[in-house]
Image (cartoon, rainbow, N blue to C red):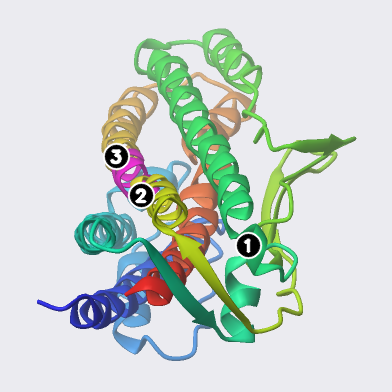
Amino acid sequence: MSTRRMYREGLENHLDLIEELRAMEIIGKELNKQPNRIQIEVAGNEDLVEGLKNGMSNLGSGLFQVSKWVGGQAITLFSKGLSAAGNGLVRAFSDNDTLIRKLLQDISREQEQEVTVAAAKVALLTCEGDFDKLSGDMNTLIRALEQLDKHSKDVLSFLDKQLLVARKLKSASTADQILKITEEFDGLKYPVFGLSHSSGNKHTSDVLPGGKVWEFVTAENGAPKYLMNGDAPEGAGASITLSKSEVSAVLNNLNKVNAMHKRLKQSYDSYLSFLKSWAEMVKAVDANLAKLDKVSGTAMSEAEKLLAGEPNALAFYSGFTPRVVSYTDRYIHGVLGVFA
């Protein structure tokens, strides 16, 4: 199969991946709202929205309505969306990996390669619109992706600690015990996204290809925001000749960018496993606390807040990482389009 045809087929799978990621983002936003105040206002995706409505219509007004939420259709839809996005990541990795290896084989027969790149593609692939800096700008992106990978591991470690503490509620029998557990839970600190630059409560990446900048901002109440901002630079069209070693270096580095799809698939699987464990824990805790009739409402309220789950991790996995995947896969296809 020609590299051009392989490239086109990869683009088609890229569009499917974007749709899977978008569906997961929609469900994630709904889950991150207060479970007893769900408001669904999403244009399009009517089937998805209808499923969410059905899943959330049984949310009762009882004290531990969270236990209904984690076992309801909404979380089932999100889990399916997370699995679908993970499978899409595997497809994207495989498509890109196969084409990169084919291109590396082809350049072994070439001494040099002349490439012509339109201005729009230069803007997509570089930080400041200078195609001569393609290799250095790719290294900047790789560094940011390594920071993302570390943060994902830190988030999963944090969630495991939360689960360990929350499980103690299964054997709590007094208000004092419940409050002691919730105090220990509140003492756990959500990990900072260690990007290249920090100032006060803001952490930012270097300027990435396409002029994008990642931000992690911690508000006064401790709830962080994940952001991706920035406009594409004003790139000029370029026509340059690259040696075999230069093309090989670019493609080998592109493999490192593509490898992030595999790592994110693993983190999605780990997060999905955590969600299942959390749901099981909530049901067990609910069964225990429902038997206690001499515990203050304050203690019960604190326990319910704890059981509501970690909204920051949900925002990271359902909101920020899908945007990163959409961005990096588009970048990968941009580079492949130069050489395919």
Q: Nearer the viewer, residue 322 or 249?
A: 249
Q: Nearer the viewer, residue 266 or 41?
A: 266
Residue at the location (40% across, 44% down)? Answer: 256
Q: Nearer the viewer, residue 330 or 288?
A: 330
Residue type (three-letter) at the residue carrying disc 1: Pro
Where, by quadrant of the figure, is residue 339 drawn? bottom left
Q: Name which of mark 2 and mark 1 comes first in the sequence.
A: 1
Q: Name which of mark 2 and mark 3 comes first in the sequence.
A: 2
The 10 Å Cα crowd at callout 2, few under 14, some 14 to 19, many 20 or more, is some
Q: Is residue 135 left or right of residue 169?
A: right
Q: Name which of mark 1 and mark 3 comes first in the sequence.
A: 1
Highlighted magenta segment, given as a residue range: 260-268
The quadrant of the rendering that contains the C terminus is bottom left
Residue type (three-letter) at the residue carrying disc 2: Asn
Q: State the residue lying farthest toward the front.
A: 111
Percent position (x, y) of residue 203? 77, 40
Could you tell me if residue 30 is visible in this image? no
What label does residue 209 carry, if any?
1
Secondary structure at badge 1 equals helix
